Image (cartoon, grey):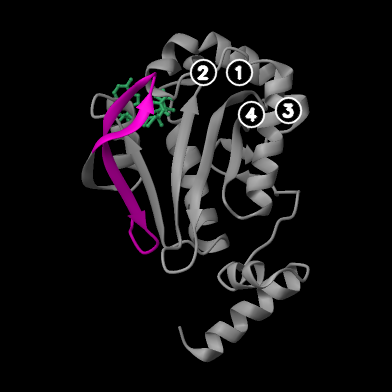
Amino acid sequence: MGLKARRRLLKVSSAAQPRGTLAQTAMAFFRTVSFNDTMPAIAGAGVLLRAPQNSDHAAWAELREASRGFLTPWEPTWPADDLTRGAFRRRLKRYADDQRSDLAYAFLIFRSDDNALMGGLTLANIRRGVAQAGSLGYWIGAPFARKGYMTAAVRTLIPFCFRTLHLHRLEAACIPANTASIGLLENTGFTREGYARSYLCINGVWQDHLLYARLNDDSD
Ligand SMILES: CC(C)(COP(=O)(O)OP(=O)(O)OC[C@H]1O[C@@H](n2cnc3c(N)ncnc32)[C@H](O)[C@@H]1OP(=O)(O)O)[C@@H](O)C(=O)NCCC(=O)NCCS
């Protein structure tokens, strides 16, 4: 990166953030946006993405419970208290901390027509510096599956990742048997890059995963 471009980045990030430690300043060097606690909602084709809030708990817990059998084979094991209000509050605190540190951005997905909560989408494990990469995770409630909503949600999030957050690379991984996830990724411009053995502990078992990625200049 040239000196001029570095100065421009530094100017934007230092205007957006309070003074901090040397390490924070170094991290800010590669971070060009700051949302503090309020993340604006992002509108897409028939969907709205916005950060989860306390008042979402009832609808979120109801949808997750109704979708338990549909989701659990593909997700990390749900803790026994996962759907409780207390666990949801802790989840939101974690999301807020991660967002403030530019480590992850969590969204719920709402149907534009009637504001029904349909699922979630998380950009996590953000690595700045020479990587400028993050990982995508997603789930849709069973009543809303296979209607194109997650395709719309991922397509909505992609410009946020590349243009707003200035990431270079978006990654996603799924179990080879997850045909829905494979179809979704291949429909939204991700390329299969590899295979990682025993990559993530899903539903209580260390499972191999297919590795996918989309670069900022990849097309649909
Ligand atoms: C993966 C998931 C998020 C897809 O959400 P969705 O809203 O149903 O996806 P879409 O309707 O946008 O479908 C996109 C593409 O995925 C594929 N797909 C979706 N559901 C599928 C299914 N049941 N069987 C085969 N392919 C499927 C198709 O290729 C589809 O495109 P098409 O309908 O034009 O053929 C959803 O199935 C889900 O939440 N699954 C359980 C949790 C999960 O797997 N999380 C991801 C872990 S890696």
Classify mark 1: helix, strand or loop. Answer: loop
Classify mark 4: helix, strand or loop. Answer: loop
Mark carried by residue 113? 4
Magenta stretch in the rendered image: 197-220
Amino acid on which the number 4 mark rests in the picture: Asp
Instruction: Give the residue pinned by disc 2.
Output: 78
Classify mark 2: helix, strand or loop. Answer: loop
Mark carried by residue 89? 3
Q: Is residue 145 visible?
A: yes
Pick whichever, 159 or 197, lies toward us.
197
Are the residues at dot 2 and dot 1 in contact (C-beta closer than 8 Å)?
A: yes
Image quarter for ligand 1: top left
Tell me if mark 4 has few (under 14), some (14-19) or many (20+) residues whose alpha carbon lies within 10 angstroms of its own. few
Instruction: Give the residue pinned by disc 1.
Output: 82
Amino acid on which the number 2 mark rests in the picture: Trp
- CA separation in Å, label 4 and label 3: 27 Å
**What is the x, y in percent for residue 154?**
46, 42
Residue at figure coordinates x 47%, y 39% from the top left? 152
Classify mark 3: helix, strand or loop. Answer: helix
- CA separation in Å, label 4 and label 2: 30 Å
Pick whichever, 219 or 133, lies toward us.
133
Residue 211, magenta (yes or no): yes
